[in-house]
């Protein structure tokens, strides 16, 4: 398996985000149909926690071993493996993916989302009550509503900084809240930062203030949540796909409401098992082949 260090090849017919069971399953069908395919993967996610998998046909391997073997199988069939983090996505003539370690966006005529879903629960009082009333999960989607207003981004990684970079061209001010994590990355990018953990958010029918555990407050009109890396639902939301809670809405073939955009595995909800992810990936891969050949 090789890492793509230069994005010279821009003629992929299909790109899959996620190298787990759903993503690899889709890739296997695409590759065997002679569709030039790439997988963008950034680590094994939930599979890393599986010490031993005994409820999937033919496997008694660990999650990490299953993950590695799946990527190797896809690579052996000609699938390009890109080891990188997806920071954002837009749609022009094709889907365009912004990657952490590559300057140029990666075009994807057909895109399959298969990164699983985040298991991050923010226990910040007031957050759920103010969702859609100043609390957002997508800068591209909602940044327009905060023109010349004061906003904050919650997160400390590259994904959070990508959201903050977008917002700084729209908002009056952008503060990065690292919630106790290291501020160095955000400070190096030139952002005002606060490292003190959040205590709560408050406001009457809309966000007005962010409160911290040391008793200090930050007046803010908007708070954008960007913890960790962008998962499939984050990317789908940026592209305008329909979302049901924290899951992507798909039809029986894994297609979203956006032509050429498919999703498979845990990010679509239902049974969170390897068997279901492989099934979803196969369906999405076959549907993507049909879409490519009839386009």
Image (tube, rainbow, N blue to C red):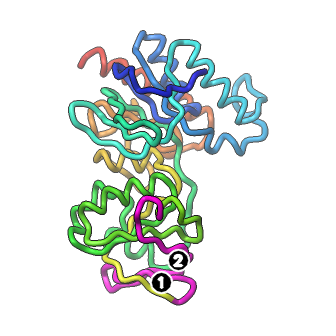
Q: Nearer the viewer, residue 124 or 164?
A: 164
Q: Quadrant of residue 249?
A: top left
Q: Which residue is mark 1?
A: 211
- Left or right of 78 on screen, residue 13: left
Front residue of 182 and 38: 182
Q: Position of residue 92 (x, y in %)?
A: 22, 36
Per the image, is 162 magenta? no
Cβ atoms at labels 1 and 2 below 8 Å apart: yes
Looking at the image, residue 17 sits to the left or right of residue 277; the answer is: left
Image position of 60 with respect to 185: above or below: above
First along the sequence among labels 1 and 2: 2
Residue 33 on image: x %, y %: 43, 11
Residue 252 visible? The answer is no
Check the image and report above or below for 21 versus 146.
above
Task: Please state the extent of the stretch shown in magenta in the rendering.
Answer: 187-215
Helix, strand, or loop for circle 2? strand
Q: Is residue 226 above or below residue 1?
A: below
Q: Quadrant of residue 59?
A: top right
In the image, is 151 to the left or to the right of 181?
A: left
Give me the residue at 51% from left, 13% from top: 78
* The magenta stretch spans residue 212: yes
Q: Residue 158: where, in percent of width, then height?
A: 47, 52
Please tell me whether residue 257 is drawn above or below residue 111 in the rendered image: below
Circle 2 packing at 10 Å, graded few (<14), some (14-19), many (20+), is many
Q: CA distance from mark 1 to mark 2?
A: 6 Å
List x then y, in percent, for residue 199: 53, 81
Residue at image coords 56%, 64%: 121
Callout 1: 10 Å neighbours few (<14), some, many (20+)? some
Q: Which residue is mark 2?
A: 198
Judge by depth and name the residue closer to the eye, 281 or 160: 160
């Amino acid at each position: 398996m090789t890492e793509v260090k230069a994005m010279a090849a821009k003629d992929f017919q299909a790109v899959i985000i996620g190298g787990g069971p759903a993503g690899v399953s889709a890739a296997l069908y695409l590759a065997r149909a002679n569709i030039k395919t790439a997988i963008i993967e950034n680590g094994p996610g939930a599979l890393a926690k599986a010490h031993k998998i005994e409820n999937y046909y033919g496997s008694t391997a660990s999650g990490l071993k299953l993950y590695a073997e799946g990527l190797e199988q896809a690579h052996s069939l000609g699938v390009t493996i890109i080891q990188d983090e997806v920071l954002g996505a837009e749609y022009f003539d094709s889907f365009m993916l912004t990657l952490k370690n590559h300057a140029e966006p990666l075009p994807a005529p057909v895109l399959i989302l298969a990164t699983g879903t985040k298991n991050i629960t923010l226990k910040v009082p007031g957050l759920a009550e103010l969702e859609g009333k100043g609390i957002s999960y997508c800068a591209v989607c909602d940044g327009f509503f905060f023109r010349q207003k004061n906003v904050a981004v919650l997160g400390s990684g590259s994904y959070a900084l990508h959201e903050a970079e977008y917002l700084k061209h729209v908002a009056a001010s952008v503060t990065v809240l690292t919630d106790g994590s290291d501020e160095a990355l955000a400070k190096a990018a030139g952002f005002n930062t606060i490292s003190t953990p959040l205590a709560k958010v408050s406001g009457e029918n809309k966000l007005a203030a962010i409160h911290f555990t040391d008793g200090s407050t930050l007046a803010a009109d908007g708070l954008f949540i960007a913890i960790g890396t962008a998962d499939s639902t984050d990317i789908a939301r940026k592209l305008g796909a329909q979302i049901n809670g924290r899951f992507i809405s798909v039809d029986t073939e894994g297609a979203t409401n956006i032509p050429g955009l498919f999703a498979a595995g845990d990010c679509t909800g239902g049974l969170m098992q390897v068997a279901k992810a492989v099934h979803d990936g196969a369906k999405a891969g076959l549907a993507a082949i049909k879409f490519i050949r009839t386009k």
